[in-house]
Amino acid sequence: MADMTSVPTQARPSSPWLSAWFRPRETIERILATNPRRHVVLLAGLAAIPTFLTNRIAAAPTTDILDWRIMLACVGLGAAGVVVLYVTAFFLRWSGKLIGGHASTLELRAAFAWSSVPNVMALAICLLWLFALRLLAGASEPIAPALSVTLQAVTSVLWLWSVIAMMLMLARIQHFGFWRTVINFALGYMLLMLTPLIITSFLFQPFEIPSAAMMPTLLVGDNLFVSKYAYGYSHYSLPLSPPLFTGRIFGHEPSRGDVVVFRLPKDDSADYIKRVIGLPGDRIQMINGLLHINGTPVKRERISDFIDDENGGAQRVKRWRETLPNGVSYETLDLQDNGFLDNTQVYDVPPGHYFMLGDNRDNSTDSRVLSQVGYVPFENLVGRAQLIFFSIGDGEAAWHIWSWPWSVRWNRLFTIVR
């Protein structure tokens, strides 16, 4: 009888959901060898939610946190997490190539996603925490501070665990040692953090309308993008507005009728938004509420009343359509006859300056008030208002999502500012 020798059975590798915790280097090698796209989008989306949910747990009653609108916000954050996945992989690949790395963006996306397994566990803990409290007590008050701090500590530790796993996976796929891994990681994430800063400094800056001075064109609670490049760049285009230079770079003069964000000449820490009415050398005057430019009255026609129904009752306000000499047309409001600024002196706009008016003529502090606004220097222009990307009813905070969707002005979203 032939001798029978036993062949050792190869141990089956553990699931990557488990091995990612303690053997991240081996895990990423197995993932890349089998299916580098495996669960990548799911993991990135789930990992974006725990921080938000933990903060809401600390601040709001459990009954509110379990509201469907909170869950909808979590879905939105998950979508944002997927975007961050792709952007982060791009920057990690770019910064890695500078120091000799060879990993592809596909491999880096896999590493980013699978290193977030501990962070996904943090999400699971948050959800279990919520449902346990709801079942046990039906809590209608914010969670006790001690429990909230404990939860935040646990989620922070798991987030740190994900960061360490990310660096270990990054070292393996880039074939880096410790210091090159640190440089790749730090530079990649620094570029990721700088991207919004670069966009808001040189391309588009978000701006929220705080007052009714530009009604009916802009309402309180409108959030819009301002194009920073429209008129070139001054030192006011930079974060914190350091006085590194004077004048404008790549300057383009505004057109009459543009809706412009500018720094207040009397206090350059304050942003105002008004419409450009007077150009350098113009003579501007209000006579019986009618705008005159260089001695000629601006064409104006009465249209249907504006109805303001957001302040405790429907208030009807006279509305006019003005057309400037260059053909730009827009609506204005007339709250009262013979208002304080309906009859003014003649304003001679100095060279290099502009005359600004709010569309809500009786409720706007603008260039007619020389002691507070006056003529606006070209250097003080921040950018041109372009697009309303979000709008919520007057008196509601944009982050207070318990008021959604009823307070969102859906009809104003993604409208062009004219």
Image (cartoon, rainbow, N blue to C red):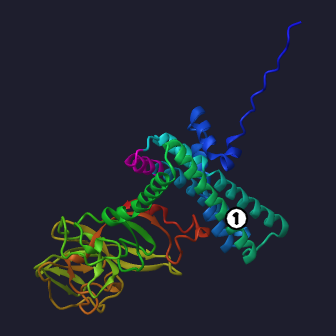
Q: Locate the N terminus and report the quarter of the image it occupies.
A: top right
The residue lying toward the viewer, choosing from 67 and 184, is 184
Q: Give the main secondary structure, helix, strand or loop, of the magenta stretch.
A: helix
Judge whether 217 appears above or below 361 on screen: above
Would you say 243 lies left or right of 125 here? Answer: left
Q: Position of residue 399 (x, y in %)?
A: 55, 70
What type is the residue that disc 1 sits on?
A: Val
The answer to whether one can see residue 164 in this image is yes
The residue lying toward the viewer, choosing from 184 and 254, is 184
The residue lying toward the viewer, choosing from 394 and 383, is 383
State the residue lying farthest toward the right: 1
Judge whether 203 appears above or below 277 on screen: above
Would you say 201 lies left or right of 62 here? Answer: left
The residue lying toward the viewer, choosing from 139 and 151, is 151
Q: Locate the C terminus and report the quarter of the image it occupies.
A: bottom left
Would you say 212 lies left or right of 11 here? Answer: left
The residue at the point 58 percent across, 44 percent down is 40
Q: Position of residue 144 (x, y in %)?
A: 75, 76
User: For the magenta stretch, what is the residue range?
Assistant: 88-100
Q: Position of residue 112 (x, y in %)?
A: 55, 49
Q: Position of residue 228 (x, y in %)?
A: 29, 66
Judge whether 97 appears above or below 284 on screen: above
The residue at the point 17 percent across, 91 percent down is 345
- Look at mark 1 in the image and give the residue it sits on: 154
The answer to whether one can see residue 260 in this image is no
